[in-house]
Amino acid sequence: MSIPELPPPNKRLGQNFLIDPNIVRKIVALAELSPSDHVLEIGPGRGILTEALSRVATRVTAIEVDPRLHAYLETKQAELPNVELVCEDALAYPVENLPIGTVVVANLPYYISTPLLFRLLDQRVRFPRMVLMLQAEVVDRLVAKPGGSDYGVLSVMGQYAAEITKSFRVSAQCFRPRPEVASAVVLLRAKERTRLNQKEEAAFRALVKAAFAHRRKTLANSLRDEGYEPHLLNETLQRLDIAPTRRAEMLSVEDFLRLALALPIHRL
Ligand code: SAM
């Protein structure tokens, strides 16, 4: 079989390939993989990380949307016997069918990193650890504390679901082509127990989104504009001792949890 040439990078698919083996080693080390671990990799690209993962894990499921790269990786299948190569959009792939305990290790395509993150966090019972390369700005938002402009929906939902550590930044020089944005690697350890059941969690997410929908407005005004009943809202805020004049960015994750549990579920 003739080996297909490496296809040129497709910018639209966020193809900035890692070329630095040292960064690959650091990412794999951070995942603390044991020989029995199953790994999910989203966007294997040219396979630099996939190869390293296949050496330390029992099985790797690698989902690549680009059929040209998928075909290229298939020619390397003999070197990657424990890698299941899937050609599919990771946003459509049924991650809920992966075994519980699967570790996610990926240099994510930045243009869809936020919806992918939410999808993975939704399935956190399955994914105890995730080591992800992301746009540095997204990592800053994930770890942000209340009071700053980085703090928002991603911070609250992320910190509710996982312990998050910003691990290290990665220079643009470590990729080809070089990305135009800064990159960083983050470690997310899913919380084993979270306080809300599925229905409450949906209400919590709706509340957090509504609270940040109008960042410059007060919490009460933003929620009212998003359809929360003003009288009930004011009464609840008062009962919880949360000043209605505060802005969403001043509320802790705990404040949002208390508020979500106290407000009737009326926006589902
Ligand atoms: N893992 C490789 C590396 O580190 O060199 C490539 C990382 S590159 C930043 C992101 C990869 O995700 C690309 O190979 C791209 O084709 C792939 N990708 C983009 N959108 C995708 C999607 N919706 N589902 C799965 N893979 C996707």
Image (tube, rainbow, N blue to C red):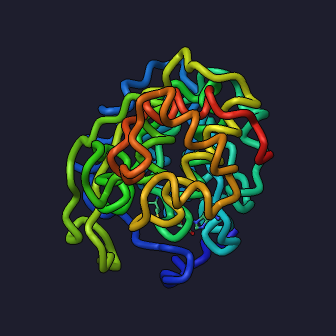
Depth check, front residue: 138 or 78: 138
Q: Is residue 227 visible?
A: yes
Q: Quadrant of ligand 1?
A: bottom right
Q: Quadrant of residue 121?
A: top right
> How far across and down, in percent of the image, does residue 190 sit?
49, 26
Q: Nearer the viewer, residue 59 or 239?
A: 239
Residue nearest the viewer, comparing 29 with 252: 252
- Please provide percent x and percent y for residue 103: 53, 31
Q: Residue at x 55, y 42 (%)?
A: 234
In this rendering, is residue 61 above or below 3? above
- Left or right side of 197 for 195: left
Residue at image location 31% in from the left, 33% down from the top: 30
Q: Residue at x 59, y 48 (%)?
A: 118
Viewer-side residue, 97 vs 54: 97
Q: Residue at x 38, y 31 (%)?
A: 31
Query: Percent x, y for residue 110?
Result: 46, 66
Tally of numbered discs: 0
Q: Where does the C terminus fall, quadrant-wise? A: top right
Q: Quadrant of residue 3?
A: bottom right
Quadrant position of the N terminus in the picture: bottom right
Q: Position of residue 70 (x, y in %)?
A: 66, 64
Inspect this view and state whether residue 161 appears. no
Q: Is residue 23 above or below residue 73?
A: above
- The answer to whether residue 245 is left or right of residue 210 is left
Quick check: 214 left or right of 187? right
